[in-house]
Amino acid sequence: EIVLTQSPGTLSLSPGDRATLSCRASQSVSSSFFAWYRQKPGQAPRLLIYAASSRAIGIPDRFSGSGSGTAFTLTISRLEPEDFAVYYCQQYGDLPRTFGQGTKVDVK
Amino acid sequence: EVQLVQSGGGLVQSGGSLRLSCAASGFTFSKFWMTWVRQAPGKGLEWVANINQDGSEQNYVDSVKGRFTISRDNTENSIYLQMSSLRAEDTAIYFCARGTGPFDNWGQGTLVTVSS
């Protein structure tokens, strides 16, 4: 099983700040089968990034993803109020599919 | 518009059974893998199971193997999760999602509470 470890656990920032979230995999993720999701309280997760760096439909360009192999990053260039939420990374190259434990972005 | 509408869930005693449903619309259901993901209260996301387009292949996380069964009915555009021998640690919100990864559309979630 591929274990995904996200850091930091919590990121305290202000609206307009830049956010950088990291995710490390215990083994190489196949062909960048890697995604990022945002989950707001009481809601289902929403896909932000797939294939490590491709934005999903309707996702604004302030979100960007990068990385390969075992190290991946999600960057939010300027935080909007709706971006204060929990973010999860996920690999979908191997079974079982696995998620990171989450990074909470909260208001400083 | 893609929609995944879930039903089922509720409170069940340890050792009991429950069936969750997820009805899809707005896309050609029979062309997509489908998945169940769960989230224990205050915790992260856990992939549970997936099923291929014609239902001939299913995969499960180890913790539910032999207890949960994922199935689908392409005439009803629905997937199901039959859960048996339920344990307290199965308490979670269960989401259905489209695809085998990435998951581009999700149901609203349904709470399953297993009381001991």
Image: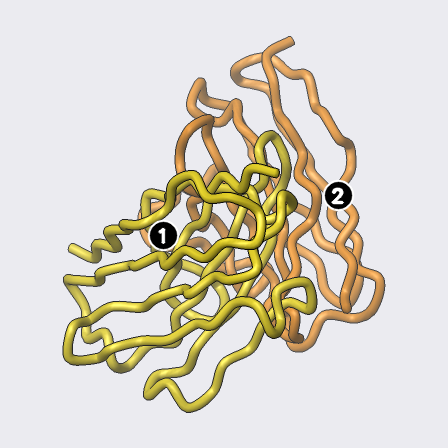
Chain colours: A orange, B yellow
Q: Where does the image place residue A7, in percent across and percent down from the top left?
A: 78, 37
Q: Residue at x 41, y 55 (%)?
A: B18
The answer to whether marks 2 and 1 mark residues whose Cβ atoms lie closer than 8 Å is no
Query: Label 1 marks which chain's residue?
Result: B
In the rendered image, which quarter contains the N terminus of chain A? bottom right
Q: Quadrant of residue B21?
A: bottom left
In depth, the one of B107 and B64 nearer the eye is: B64
The disc labelled 2 sits on which kind of residue?
Gln
The residue labelled by disc 1 is B106
Residue B73, numbered label = none
What element does badge 1 sit on? Answer: loop
Q: Where does the image place residue A77, in percent across and percent down from the top left?
A: 56, 32
The residue labelled by disc 2 is A6
Q: Residue at x 37, y 59 (%)?
A: B19
10 Å crowding of disc 2: few (<14), some (14-19), many (20+): many
Q: Quadrant of residue A12?
A: top right
In depth, the one of A40 and B37 nearer the eye is: B37
